[in-house]
Image: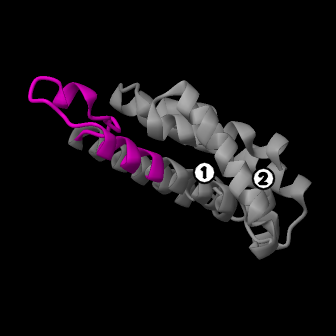
């Protein structure tokens, strides 16, 4: 479990805390908590379970850190962690996700459903296989082909509008984040 999810858990902890060393400690705490609670775990969606534990560990850490520091007027806005989501970024992210959904909806079956679940809802191949009952290799092929089709749809839009931006990031990597 650690080998499979250590990078994911660490990246969640680092994004939430912004501190390399604290993220390492929190990732380790996450796996310790998961190990202690393994008997209570129902075995479904291990990835989401670990992500939730990591998120809760980080939230608890941030709450404790917030209580320990007393902000002064000069340093308050410098020390308050920012998640980087300004109203402009939030609106852009929403627009990109809407465009991604539009492109996924433009695909024919079976690529439409696979693309929506994989790219928009960010389900893993294993989660898709469990949901649909399809072979993993079949789903991997469909994701690969859907990705190429979405790239073409984004390319047509960018050529038509003369834009280059966050569309390229999503179409180029396959997944946001």
Indicate the secondary structure of the residue bearing disc 2.
helix
Residue 95 lies left or right of residue 150; in this view the side is left
| Residue at the left extreme, as displayed | 73
Count numbered badges in the picture: 2
In the foreground, 177 or 161: 177
Q: Residue at x 90, y 62 (%)?
A: 135
**Residue 72, position in %: x, y?**
13, 30
Residue 33 lies left or right of residue 170; in this view the side is right
**Residue 11, position in %: x, y?**
59, 36
The region drawn magenta spans: 60-86
Is residue 176 visible in this depiction of the protein?
no
In the foreground, 125 or 85: 85
Whichever of callouts 2 and 1 sits on the residue coming sooner in the sequence is: 1
Q: Which mark is residue 91?
A: none
Q: Which mark is residue 142?
A: 2
Q: Mark 2 or mark 1, which is nearer to you?
A: 1
Query: Does 148 appear above or below 143?
Result: above
Residue 73 lies left or right of residue 35; in this view the side is left
Q: CA distance from mark 2 to mark 1?
A: 12 Å
What quarter of the picture does the C terminus occupy?
Answer: top right
CB atoms of marks 2 and 1 within 8 Å = no
**Residue 94, position in %: x, y?**
35, 50
In the foreground, 63 or 132: 63
Residue that badge 1 annotates: 119
Asked if the stretch drawn in magenta spans residue 144, the answer is: no
């Amino acid at each position: 479990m650690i080998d499979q999810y250590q990078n994911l858990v660490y990246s969640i902890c680092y994004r939430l805390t912004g501190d390399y060393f604290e993220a390492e400690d929190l990732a380790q705490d996450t796996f310790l908590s998961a190990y202690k609670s393994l008997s209570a775990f129902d075995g479904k969606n291990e990835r989401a379970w670990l992500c939730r534990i990591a998120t809760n560990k980080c939230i608890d850490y941030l709450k404790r850190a917030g209580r320990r520091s007393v902000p002064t007027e000069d340093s308050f806005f410098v020390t308050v962690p920012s998640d980087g989501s300004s109203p402009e970024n939030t609106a852009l992210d929403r627009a990109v996700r809407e465009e991604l959904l539009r492109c996924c909806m433009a695909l024919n079956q079976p690529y439409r459903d696979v693309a929506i679940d994989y790219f928009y809802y960010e389900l893993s191949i294993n989660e898709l296989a469990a949901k649909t009952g399809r072979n993993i290799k079949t789903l991997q092929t469909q994701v690969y082909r859907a990705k190429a089709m979405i790239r073409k749809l984004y390319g047509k839009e960018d050529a038509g509008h003369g834009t280059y931006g966050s569309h390229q990031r999503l179409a180029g990597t396959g997944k946001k984040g």
